[in-house]
Image: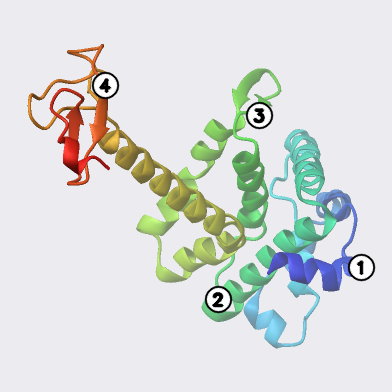
Amino acid sequence: MIERLERSLSRFAIPGLIRYVVALNALVFILITFDPNFAQFLVLDRAAILHGEVWRLVSWIFIPTTPSFFWIIFYLMFTWWLGDLLEGSWGTFRMNAYYILGMVLCIGSALIFGASEGNLFLNLSLFLAVATLAPDLEILLFLILPVKIKWVALFSLIFPVFVLIFQPLAEKMVVVMCLGNYVIFFAPAYFKGTLASHKTRERRQRFEAAKLPADAALHACAVCRATERTHPDLEFRVSSDGNEYCTEHLPIRRTA
């Protein structure tokens, strides 16, 4: 399906989409630094949207997840890096489709259930995608400690799992819907790979069950039970009755 959409809509894809998102995150961070109340005009708020503040359908993705000047540098660089990795791996259209689908699902969760976690889970979906595509890629945790990205991804799932277990339904649905783009993109390949592995394992088991032991004989006389292993000098023939005989006991008149 994604291939058909790409053929039809690829001309609308925005190269370097996450770079623009990062740049606007930086701008909003500066504005919030001068006026902390500015963020209230950008958040994904159902009541405000229904009262005509439709810019909130997009503006919420530009709110940085940290007020710290030190961490904002790390956050912006890391998000830029994730976007470039995904676009380099998938191409511009698929990267756009993944991010925009995540946006749409997050907006849907806010409009339907009235709850939002900002762009926290949307950004997490980018990170999980990279960790799935390149699980052994090493990153510098806190800029000093090299760690494989798959372990950081597993650790990052602690909060979503906590929400799914302990929080109200509306908050649970934020997690389910805002990470829905990850599930939609990766679940089919996962199940397809699991099914292929299961079939391969079944074929291997059938092959091993059918395979003769290393010391098994291929030929055996129906009369004396001699085999090519016990009597290497004997020759064996199949008679017209379907049985195999050594040349000494072969029924002459029924020879095939």
In this view, the residue farthest toward the bottom is: 51
Q: Which residue is mark 2?
A: 114
Horizontal and vertical percent position of residue 123: 67, 51
Amino acid, disc 4: Glu
> In the drawing, what numbered circle is on residue 91?
none
**Is residue 250 visible in the rendered structure shown here?**
yes
> In the drawing, what numbered circle is on residue 235?
4
Q: In the figure, is residue 43 to the left or right of 25?
A: left
Give me the C-alpha separation between circle 3 and circle 4.
Answer: 61 Å
Up-down relation of residue 246 to residue 38 (above or below): above
Up-down relation of residue 104 to residue 256 (above or below): below
Q: Nearer the viewer, residue 19 or 111?
A: 19
Q: How is the image coloured?
A: rainbow
Give me the C-alpha separation between circle 2 and circle 3.
Answer: 37 Å
Q: Which mark sits nearer the N-terminus, 1 or 2? A: 1
Q: Nearer the viewer, mark 3 or mark 4?
A: 4
In this view, the residue farthest toward the left is: 224
Give me the C-alpha separation between circle 2 and circle 4.
Answer: 85 Å
